Amino acid sequence: MSPPPPGPLSDIVEAGGLGLQVIDLDDGGVAPIVSMGVVRLGVSRAATAPAVDKERFDVLLSADPAAAAPWVGLPAGRLEAAAQVIQAMVEAQPVAAAVACQGLRASLKLSFDEALAQESLAYSMLLASEGFRAWRAAHPPRGRPRDVAPRVATQRRDDGRLSIRLTRAAARNAVDARMRDALAEALAFALDDPDAAPVVLSGEGPSFCAGGDLDEFGSAADPGQAHAIRLLRSATALAHRLGPRLTVRAQGACIGAGIEIPAAAGRIVATADAAFRLPEVGMGLIPGAGGTASIPRRIGRHRTAFMALTGWDIDAGTARTWGLVDAVEGLA
């Protein structure tokens, strides 16, 4: 006999297939792996983070603010708030939360390009999910007038460096399809530069990049074709190939793609007001501009999962301590 068809998502959650498993690490707790779909959170309220098998967890929270990676060290009040936010996120978007953690568990075991492909496949799948459809219904596209202004400007500087600037400042440099294509073209041009000149990527206005243009989320008629386009026109893949030749200058809001793409660069220099955030799980999605490949290679998968499951801003000082950025202007 064939197995019965799966029930509604609520049945899967109640059966333990999806959800949050919280382990108190101060009581000698261990994390039995009950399901690949369960998000595993380890919490220590001790003054010093204990030794643990990090591979059994997705996020590790410690009351020691100076706890080393993979821990996220927070003052006691913030630790409790973070645990509550993660719980609420997993309850609201169990599929997206599970997929985000599943992808991050595998990311560092894959090549960079393989990790990008894994992310894109998962992202396309989630675009058809109940969680994303509910978010899209609650946040319909605004239907703004079509903006035909250029999205990216490229210039050869007097010192020989190649400058690439995002020029959609009025929209906080939100990445729409036109900006994605223009940025990919500019980075590909830089990659093919026979002089192999240094490249500087920046954004005009108070924000480097506020992430993907929300009006376009879920607008592709063919998810399979959208997956192919994401891989063929991936600014994050090109940034990774440029490696040490590419420096990103980041200021203000660096949300979603606004940190996913820079994280693949050889160097990120942030201003003191820069803040970094991954909001996609709250939309029923996962980072879709390459962040599950680029960010873990800077800060590890546990801290990346923390960013994705809380949606909290990471300030410039913390970003430098973690290695998400390489330098902060004005900080020694």
Image (spheres, rainbow, N blue to C red):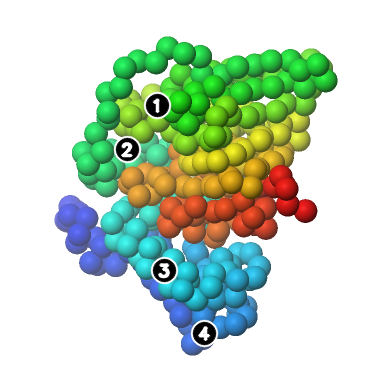
- Helix, strand or loop for disc 3: helix
Give neighbour class at mark 1: few <14, some 14-19, many 20+ (Cα, 10 Å). some
- Marks 4 and 2, the one that precedes in the sequence: 4
> CB under 8 Å between callouts 1 and 2?
yes
Give neighbour class at mark 4: few <14, some 14-19, many 20+ (Cα, 10 Å). few
> What residue does disc 1 label?
226
Which one is closest to the eye, mark 4 or mark 2? 4
Quadrant of the rendered image containing residue 111: top right
Q: In terms of depth relative to the viewer, which is nearer, 321 or 245? A: 321
Q: CA distance from mark 4 to mark 2?
A: 39 Å
> CB under 8 Å between callouts 1 and 4?
no
- Marks 1 and 2, the one that precedes in the sequence: 2
> What residue does disc 2 label?
127
Give neighbour class at mark 3: few <14, some 14-19, many 20+ (Cα, 10 Å). some
Quadrant of the rendered image containing residue 187: top right
> What residue does disc 4 label?
26
Q: CA distance from mark 3 to mark 4?
A: 18 Å
Q: CA distance from mark 2 to mark 3?
A: 29 Å
Which one is closest to the eye, mark 1 or mark 3? 3
- Marks 2 and 3, the one that precedes in the sequence: 3
Q: CA distance from mark 1 to mark 2?
A: 10 Å
- Marks 1 and 4, the one that precedes in the sequence: 4
- Marks 1 and 3, the one that precedes in the sequence: 3
